[in-house]
Image (spheres, rainbow, N blue to C red):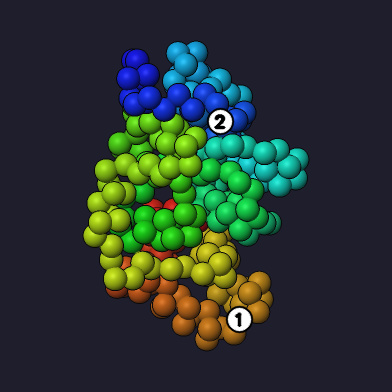
Amino acid sequence: MDYRGRRKGKDCLTERALQSILIVEDHQLSCQGYELIVEQAGCKGAIPKVTVQQAHSLKKAYQLVFKEAIHFDIVFLDICMPAYPEKNLYSGEDLGRLIVEKQLKTRILVMTSLTDKLRLEEILQTVKPHGFLVKGEVDEYHLITAIEHLLLDEYYYSPTIQRILQNPSEEAAHVAEEEKKFLYLLSQGIRNREIGGHLCWSLSKVEKRKRVLHKKLGIEKGNTMALVNRAKELGII
């Protein structure tokens, strides 16, 4: 595929300093596919040639970005990632939010399989990514076009995300950090009385918060497993 016809004379793309991309994705085949697309685009001159690193866990991504202090110009960020509770990272959303809070001047390109409208709205609010692609719409064209826009400090959203922006809901469901920790503890099979000890909550507060989360996540009735499964479906934990 020839990418250069899409650039509309924006030769400054190659003038921007682009040195490294971090792919945060727990599926190695997906990582390899993204990296191959980037490398081929670099060889064809569509984008500057770039080094690519992969992180298949939030722990690895955290170590690269915050422990080793490696600067990445762009982070490809999946949302549904195994939790890293030691750093209160329960999904890719939490890593993205932390990058934004630390003002690392890293452009975030979210790529997710999530389709729930309220959940996508929440990620737009918390991560504020420069790029946002729904995986069902990701192909070679959209991925490289997104990178081109990010290099120019422009935003690029897939058709699904654009529709959400055009027709926002009245209120996106927000799950607080302590609620994410609560859901994670539930997912580990920890009982209600023991959870109270982890969070310094009374047993009545544990039960009340569980009812609140059932409502937030759109579960009218169901046991703890239904709540945990819904949280996983939404990429919250």
Residue lying at 34% horizontally and 15% vertically, measured from the top left = 1
Residue that mark 1 sits on: 201
Query: Which of these two is toward me, 228 or 59?
Result: 59
**Residue at 41 percent of width and 77 percent of height:** 212
Tell me where residue 6 sits by quadrant.
top left
Q: In this view, does 101 lie to the left or right of 213?
A: right
Tell me which residue sits at (24%, 60%) in the image: 167
What residue appears at the point 35 percent right and 74 percent down from the top-left corner?
A: 215
Residue 135 numbered tag: none
Say if 226 sits above or below 113 in the image.
Answer: below
The three-letter code of the residue at mark 1 reads Trp
Amino acid type indicated by mark 2: Arg
- 220 to the left or right of 109: left
Q: Characterize the local packing of mark 1: few (<14), some (14-19) or many (20 or more) Cα atoms within 10 angstroms.
A: some
Q: Mark 2 points at which residue?
A: 16
Q: Which of marks 1 and 2 is in front?
A: 2
Label 2 packing within 10 angstroms: few (<14), some (14-19), many (20+): few
Residue 65 image position (x, y, % from top left): 67, 43
Q: Where is residue 197 in the image (x, y as percent from the top left)?
A: 66, 76
Q: Which picture quadrant has residue 200?
A: bottom right
Query: Which one is in front, 171 or 187?
Result: 171
Q: Where is residue 154 in the image (x, y as percent from the top left)?
A: 43, 42
Q: How far apart are marks 1 and 2 (CA)?
A: 50 Å
Residue at disc 1, secondary structure: loop
| SS of the residue under disc 2 | loop
